[in-house]
Image: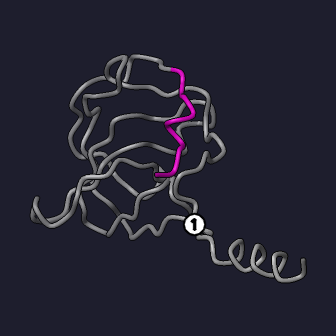
Amino acid sequence: MPCRLWLALSVWLLLPTSEAGRQMPKLSDKKLCADSECSHPILIARALQDYYPGDCRFIPIRQGQLVYVYAMLKDRGNLFWAGSVQDSYYGQQEARIGHFPSSVVEETHPLMPASTEVKTTKWDFYCY
């Protein structure tokens, strides 16, 4: 019996402890988008500073990078936006959509009005 308990405890300790594959707390219940699917960018912004994410819901941003903004979270005063970062050379970085504080970017090119209110789902904050 002690051998089985030790083996089960050993396996449990070796399991990965990453946030991938789990639901994270929602940052907001609503978001503003250009369309009901949030598939069109609202604006292009340039990063004013580096941003290092605290968890998997967020994307890392380097100063000077362009960010395509697809949604503005609504409930907390637009503190967080959702977007995709592009590197200086398009092929250098895989496109990934995530959240970031709106304070780390400046709007450079408005594209479409963020006039469509959309409810967020658990998938908006799911870590893959």
Q: Which residues are magenta?
A: 119-128
**Left or right: 56 with respect to 25?**
left
**Left or right: 128 with respect to 105?**
right
Q: Which residue is mark 1?
A: 18
Kindly identify the residue that appears in the image at 26 percent across and 45 percent down: 68
Question: For residue 54, which quarter of the picture?
Answer: bottom right
What residue type is disc 1 on? Answer: Ser
Q: Is residue 5 above or below residue 35?
A: below
Look at the numbered disc 1 and give the secondary structure of its residue. loop
Kindly identify the residue that appears in the image at 40 percent across and 16 percent down: 116
Give the x, y percent position of residue 86: 21, 57
Which sits in the foreground, 104 or 125? Answer: 125
For label 1, count other residues whose C-alpha is less than 10 Å away and answer few (under 14), some (14-19) or many (20+). Answer: few
Question: For residue 75, which quarter of the picture?
Answer: top right
The quadrant of the image that shows the N terminus is bottom right
Kindly identify the residue that appears in the image at 22 percent across and 58 percent down: 94
Give the x, y percent position of residue 32: 44, 26
**Left or right: 3 with respect to 39?**
right
